[in-house]
Image (spheres, rainbow, N blue to C red):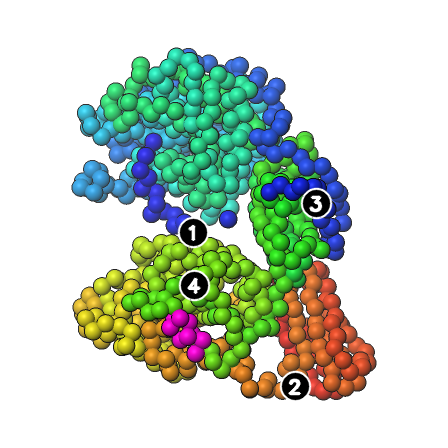
Amino acid sequence: MKKISLFCTFFLAVFLSWAQEPPAFPVDNILPGISRYEKVPVFCFPGQGKFLPDSLISVCIAEIRQDSITSYLQSLENFGTRFMLADNHRDVAEWIKNKFISLGYANARLDSFLCITQWPATTGPIDTSWQYNVFATLPGQLNPDVEVISGGHYDAIVYSGGDPYFVAPGADDNGSAIAANLEIARVLKAKNITPSSSITFAAWAGEERGLLGSVDKVIKAMNQGDQIKTYVNMDMVSSDPDTANWDFHVNTYQGSEWLGGIAAEVAWNHTSLSPVLNPGNSSGSDSYGFWLGGFSPVYFEEMHFSPNYHQITDLVVNCNMPYCTEITKVALGTLLTADQLPSKVRYELFNPGTGNSLIPRWRPNPETNLAGYMVRVGYSSSNYHTSFMTVDTALILTNLSPDTLYYIAVSAVADNGYEGPVTEYSDRPALVTLDHGILIVDDSEGGILYPGDSVVDSFYAGLLHDFQYTEYDAYVQQQISLAEMGKYSSILWHINTQTSVTVLNRYLNDVIKYLKLGGNILFTVYQPERAIYKISSYPNQWGDGTFLHDYCGIGLNELNSISRFNAALPESPDYPLLTIDTTKTLVQFNYHIAYIEALWPEHNENILYRYGTAFDTATTQGEMAGRPVGIKCEGQGGWKTVMLSFPLFYMDFAAAKEFTRSIMSDYFGEAPIGIPEPTEKASMLSVFPNPAFYQTRLNFTLKSNTRVSISLYNLLGEKVRNIAEKNYQAGSYSLTLDLGLFPSGLYLIGMETGQGTMMKKLVVAANK
């Protein structure tokens, strides 16, 4: 066990009962291909009601033997040391592999990974070695590609009283978990169990130096797309000073609490243990990496921490073997139950921006023995009043109340009647029109060097004096919704202080939804990494699935707190030079400001500005000169963003206004007040929502009677549908376009009238 994990460098934190029964939610406009569904009673959830295969668990648990567990544990202790850098570390892995083979697991194998570490930590020499995880699998009959994993680490260490290269017995930490897994593996073979999913036993190397073996597995699983249903982790499960009245920790992880509920029920029904559920996403053992990787773990741990932790006295003779045997029973029962249940559904709750609809949609589960999916809707978490069963992977919930919070849960149901874990999200139906001009979002109070908030607000309002705009004080409101943002076609979002307490951080999902529906945002943010992620360590890389990468085009950001910034140097003559307003800085800083991040894009053509300074580049103050500080990005859905890592408030007003006008009019397409659209026909046709999911609406106005021809084209210029071909009277019209049969991608809508011809882009979002 590693109480202080070194794992933090691997992953970077890359979501009221009613007095009377509310009315049922109608499910109208069932998606194309979704024809089979039925209203059903709410099922019990894992951990809430009778759902465990009790007879099978009882039969298998009765086979577990304390003497077998003790024998395995003594053999592990007899190695003398299991330190990962000791000469015998491969011998230990080979022994575990061969023991699995002797139990009937001919597929037992070693999986190697290269490890570079230092011992003693921070002071000793660098050591490069091959380390070895051990795997043995009981193949599943129905779903062999879906894994239920049970594991623990086999390496050991001592920090006092001996040299770990020669002595590290590690009986409790963590030979106890390996012994328990060997016994579970023996029992499953002895009882001739054929699981539905594949049950894999794992013995991890290198846990004591930073969860190294389990991290290697998680990385490989994510890269290969492995279907890991659950991971049951044991770490230190054989120390308790009592002879009876035992309890133990069931450490749970956010999103996987259901697995802790299974373990608790197994303990109550089949052992003498009292489970203590302990939420908190523990980083102290190998389960942590599985959670960060998006899998569902649970972690069993002794209640009374061993007094022999990381000492040469961590011996079998000091272990409570009856207690270890009981925890082994819980692990076995948890594995058997998890095997019977379908996997957690990976789903998203799509808000189409119609004001009365929400669309839960999900990836098909990997299991082949599914009866379908359960969709539940309610007004509060875990309190659902309407349920639907469907064999498809999406539903359109319509006639919902605008801006009302709904909780929607999705789970898979196997054909044996068992229901898998529930995934719940909440959202408010929002009407997105993108027709009210620009919204200025103030997400901070004042700014650095303490200007008044009203002064800052006046500055940003002045930048948009030539546009239609509305101001919204997010700092005062402490919230923002898609419904609020969705009225506006563009947003200027400003944060002028060093802060991690932002509405942008808390409502980032709503911001993403707004962009997906075609909005544009200009961010001018002091330390965007801290404001968005509450992180202030540098440098940081951003990959797929992160906001800075996917919606701002940023692959890496960095900061030198000593460097000083006094200008944003344009990458293109299309944008003005932005220089510091010396009245808003200090003479002792030579009229510079600090803590301006560099934002490195994936594509250099997206750089708008670079870091400017009056300090020599050979000095620390001038070190960041020339690095990007302004990035633009646009997505397939038609949205556009600009991210500035400096607040425009501190720049010369005239240049800042010129820049803002250029972004809003030339890049975002906003029309300044008093300047008409280029032609009458440019406002004749609008498409909403865009991007569209299964339907969109074409709205157009005719000044006179005319024949209208509207067609849908793909990017090859091929006509794929005639939408309208008829004579219309003068007036306004709205046509519904069904997109359910069209693959996702970019299309063009062409409209020909006696008043002219025009084209509009249409993005069809993924329909399956």
Q: Nearer the viewer, mark 4 or mark 2?
A: 4
The residue under label 4 is 443
- Residue 324 vs 534, above or below: the answer is above
Query: Which amino acid, mark 3?
Result: Pro
Q: Is residue 311 left or right of residue 432?
A: left
In what element is the residue under mark 1? loop
Residue 354 quadrant:
bottom right
Query: Which amino acid, mark 1?
Result: Val
The residue under label 2 is 680
Tell me the distance, in whole angstroms, between the alpha carbons under discs 2 and 3: 48 Å
Tell me the distance, in whole angstroms, between the alpha carbons under discs 2 and 1: 47 Å
Q: Residue at x 57, y 35 (%)?
A: 144
User: In the image, which residues are magenta?
Assistant: 454-462
Tag 4: Cα neighbours inside 10 Å, few (<14), some, or many (≥20)? many
* Residue 128 located within the stretch drawn in magenta: no
Instruction: Say if residue 93 shows up in the picture.
Output: no
Q: Is residue 645 left or right of residue 345?
A: left
Q: Residue at x 57, y 40 (%)?
A: 344
Asked if labels 3 and 2 touch by Cβ distance under 8 angstroms, the answer is no
The residue under label 3 is 22
The residue under label 1 is 14
Tag 1: Cα neighbours inside 10 Å, few (<14), some, or many (≥20)? few
